[in-house]
Amino acid sequence: MVLAIESIIEDKPYYSKSVIELMRKLTANDFLIDTIDRKLLYELSKGTKMSQLPHIIPSSISALEKRKRVLKEIFNLSDKEDRDLIRIAEEKGFI
C-alpha cells in the first residue's frame, strides 16, 4: 500500500499485482491473436456450437474451422480436442 501512495505522490503509474501478472502473461507470448480469434476462443469456452458461430462472428463455418486449426497449431495442439485449446488459451491469458 505504501508503494501505491508513493507512486501517486510522485506521479508514477501504479499497477496492482493482478494487472502486473496479466501484463507478464501477455508479453510472454510471442505470437499475435486477432480479435476474431479471441472471440472464437471465448465463444468456444462458453460452449457455443460451431453451427451457431457464424451468427455471432461474421465468418463462414469453414473459415472459423480453419482459424481453430491455426490456433491449435500456434499452441502446438494439432491433434488435440477443443477442450485442450481452451485450456491452453486460458493459461496464456487469451480468454
Image: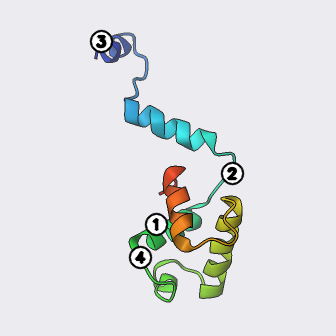
- Nearer-the-camera pick, 8 or 33: 33
Q: Give the label on residue 4, or none.
A: none
Q: Which residue is mark 3?
A: 2
For label 4, the SS is: loop
**N-terminal label among 2 and 1:** 2
**N-terminal label among 3 and 4:** 3
- Nearer-the-camera pick, 42 or 7: 42
Label 3 environment density (alpha carbons within 10 Å; few <14, some 14–19, many ≥20): few
For label 2, the SS is: loop
Q: Give the label on residue 42, or none.
A: 1
Q: Which residue is mark 4?
A: 47
Q: Give the label on residue 31, or none.
A: 2
The residue shown at (46%, 79%) is: 56
For label 1, the SS is: helix
Q: Position of residue 36 (x, y in %)?
A: 57, 68
Location of residue 68 by image quarter:
bottom right
**N-terminal label among 3 and 1:** 3
Label 1 environment density (alpha carbons within 10 Å; few <14, some 14–19, many ≥20): some
Relative to 54, say whether 18 is above or below: above
